[in-house]
Amino acid sequence: MYSNLSDFITDWKAEASFTLKIFEAIPDELILTTVSDNVRSLGRLAWHITQTLTEMPHKAGVVDEDNLDNLPIPDSFAKISDIYTLYSEALIKNLEQKWMGTDLTDSIEIYGQHWEKRKLLSVLITHQIHHRAQMTIVMRLLELKVPGIYGPSREEWAQFGMEAQE
């Protein structure tokens, strides 16, 4: 867990760029395509990640309004990316204004529980990673090219003239 806000912001900026990399790799015609009744569409997953940028911070008192609550999925990944970028940057600004210099072990109430502030920061990161991973699985099932995030993807290994690791 985080001991200072600066470390979270550094991680958040990297993870946000990875999220946008995934969003940008998906053609708009697949935004509502599902691979199973039990799996969200790529657009729904991307929009859920994006909506969390106002939902969790609002519940934690970091932002005053949950501006994305109940809004429909935009019709393009470019629009989702733009909204994601806007609220990702707003999240950082709000955290800097409200939590910079505060003790991240202070307790906040969220979802009927008491969390340390640093737990919220960790959950914001891991929630995004979790749903981004779901997106890459759906992308594979739809035979889309998956960009590498923490290392080269299968397609990127091939571009390097190397065999992908099994």
Image (cartoon, grey):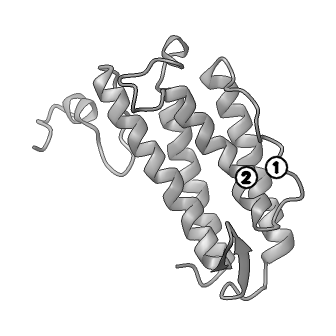
Judging from the image, what secondary structure is the residue with disc 2 in?
helix
- Residue at 15% over, 38% down: 164
Residue tagged 1: 66
Label 1 to label 2, Cα distance in Å? Answer: 5 Å
The residue singled out by tag 2 in the image is: 55
User: Which of the pair 132/107 is nearer the observer?
Assistant: 107
**In front: 102, or 154?**
102
Mark 1 residue crowding within 10 angstroms, few (<14) / some (14–19) / many (20+): some
Along the viewing direction, whichever of 75 and 114 lies nearer the viewer: 114
Tell me: 13 left or right of 165. Answer: right
Above or below residue 37? Residue 100 is below
Question: Left or right: 94 with respect to 35?
Answer: right
Q: How crowded is mark 2: few (under 14 residues within 10 Å), some or many (20 or more)?
A: some
The answer to the question of whether label 1 and label 2 lie on touching residues, with beta carbons closer than 8 A, is: yes
Residue at (77% x, 41% y) in the render: 69
Identify the amino acid type marked 1: Asp
Name above or below for residue 135 compared with residue 95.
above
Residue 70 percent coordinates (x, y):
76, 36
Marked residue nearer the N-terminal end (1 or 2)? 2
